[in-house]
């Protein structure tokens, strides 16, 4: 059902953007259909987000008990969130490393190594001994695998979103921009659904002994399928021709940052509201409910899955809205709405089942509308030569600044000083987005 829906959306989205035929430079008469490129973006991102959310959910429901049993529940969760940040810190280094690999050995080699590393680190987590059997070494291995995931995610950038953005008609760029963002809610629904099923089907001892490992096996299998699906696309002559035609090739990171560093920073801050909200409706509330509520975790995951479906609708709607009113106007308006929403966050989260449900559903809807246009909202600032590397590093910095520490900071502050600090964190992200968009507009006017 999900697959057919994605294909339908992708085909509709790209129906008029490409010519019906083209010839690859090597003399091979190959053709990449519009639907294949768009579906490659969605499938590739959905597989990465599934892997991402499997780890995120396990950080709340599994790792505190399995790897930090000697600590209290709150302390164990906070330590788990510390390790959670490692992938975001490692991701820019992965981008730099794999850009160099691509320059020397090609994008197929880069993508293969990155996705094999991602799959191996994910599978490694599934086989990790617990703290009870291996002690502190189990925590060290978890940290190593988490860092490897971050490095691999940095290397998995394939340029497809940038290619779609550049090939999109002027009046459909918002629609095209949202395609890759659909991967986030789709990945969350599958990951949360799998954990909800296991929690509802197994006893707690069975779940903590072996049940939690199953989603990591599934993530590994999905990575293998995604690897071959993406290689089938990126290894074609026409794909190479399209990237070269648009100058979507890696450039030395030092050269790019010296020339375009300002654009990387503005682009990352422009997405701050979306990335801050991202973890404050997914990971943080799950940890809060687990620690401070008697509510069924399976039921709460179900509410979050409904929220993720609303987010998927919001992502699609964001494309229509952005094409009518402009991507940056849309992103700025949603940042203002997120700022307003931040003021209600404490009372909703502390408002029992009804209030928590409203927080999740409204939060996810705002997330979809905002996140749908958060990627590359100002990447048009990059000159063609630097766009491939610049877009990748902009995403890395946005994740690091906006999302990496959100669960840790939100849970730590709210547990010790109250839920009002969740509002402060979310409000700061919204203000960061509005400031970055304002600076970007001023710089464009000056140019």
Image (cartoon, rainbow, N blue to C red):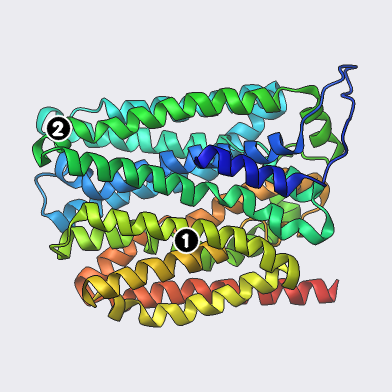
Front residue of 386 and 112: 112
Residue positioned 35% across, 76% down in the render: 345
Which numbered circle lies on residue 145? none
- The crowd level at tag 2 (other Cα within 10 Å; few <14, some 14-19, many 20+) is some
- Determine if residue 371 is in view: no
* Badge 1 or badge 2: first in the primary sequence: 2
Question: Pointer 2: what residue?
Answer: 209
Q: Nearer the viewer, residue 209 or 262?
A: 209
Residue 145 location, x and y as percent? 36, 33
Residue 273: image x %, image y %?
52, 68
**Element at badge 2?**
helix
- Using the numbered discs, state the Cα–Cα distance from disc 1 to disc 2 in whole angstroms: 34 Å
User: What element does badge 1 sit on?
Assistant: helix
Identify the residue shown where x is 76% and y is 53%: 259
Q: Nearer the viewer, residue 28 or 119?
A: 28
The residue lying at 76 percent from left, 33 percent from top is 33
């Amino acid at each position: 059902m999900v697959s057919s829906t994605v294909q339908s959306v992708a085909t509709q989205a790209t129906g008029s953007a490409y010519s019906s035929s083209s010839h690859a430079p090597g003399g091979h008469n190959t053709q990449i259909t519009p639907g294949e490129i768009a579906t490659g973006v969605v499938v590739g991102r959905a597989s990465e987000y599934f892997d991402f959310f499997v780890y995120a959910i396990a950080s709340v429901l599994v790792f505190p008990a399995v790897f930090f049993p000697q600590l209290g529940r709150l302390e164990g969760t906070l330590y788990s969130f510390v390790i959670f940040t490692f992938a975001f810190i490692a991701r820019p280094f992965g981008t730099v490393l794999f850009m160099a690999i691509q320059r020397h050995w090609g994008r197929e080699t880069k993508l293969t190594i990155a996705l094999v590393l991602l799959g191996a680190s994910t599978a490694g987590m599934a086989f990790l001994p617990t703290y009870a059997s291996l002690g502190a070494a189990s925590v060290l291995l978890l940290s190593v695998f988490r860092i490897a995931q971050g490095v691999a995610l940095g290397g998995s950038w394939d340029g497809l979103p940038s290619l779609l953005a550049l090939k999109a008609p002027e009046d459909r760029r918002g629609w095209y921009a949202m395609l890759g963002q659909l991967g986030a809610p789709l990945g969350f629904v599958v990951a949360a659904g799998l954990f909800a099923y296991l929690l509802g089907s197994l006893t707690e001892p069975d779940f903590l002994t072996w049940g939690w490992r199953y989603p990591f096996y599934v993530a590994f299998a999905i990575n293998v399928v995604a690897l071959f699906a993406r290689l089938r696309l990126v290894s074609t002559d026409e794909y190479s021709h399209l990237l070269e035609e648009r100058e979507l090739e890696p450039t030395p990171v030092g050269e790019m940052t010296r020339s375009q560093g300002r654009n990387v920073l503005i682009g990352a801050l422009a997405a701050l509201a979306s990335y801050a909200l991202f973890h404050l409706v997914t990971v943080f509330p799950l940890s809060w409910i687990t620690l401070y509520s008697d509510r069924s975790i399976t039921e709460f995951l179900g509410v979050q899955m409904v929220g993720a479906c609303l987010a998927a609708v919001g992502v699609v709607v964001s494309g229509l809205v952005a094409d009518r009113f402009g991507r940056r106007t849309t992103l700025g308006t949603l940042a203002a709405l997120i700022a307003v929403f931040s003021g209600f966050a404490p009372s909703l989260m502390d408002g029992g089942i009804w209030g928590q449900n409203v927080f999740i559903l409204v939060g996810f809807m705002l997330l979809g509308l905002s996140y749908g246009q958060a990627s590359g909202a100002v990447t048009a600032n990059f000159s063609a030569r630097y766009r491939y590397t610049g877009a990748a590093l902009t995403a890395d910095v946005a994740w690091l600044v906006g999302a990496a520490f959100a669960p840790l900071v939100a849970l730590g502050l709210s547990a010790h000083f109250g839920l009002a600090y969740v509002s402060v964190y979310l409000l700061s992200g919204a203000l960061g987005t509005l400031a970055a968009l304002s600076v970007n507009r001023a710089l464009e006017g000056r140019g």
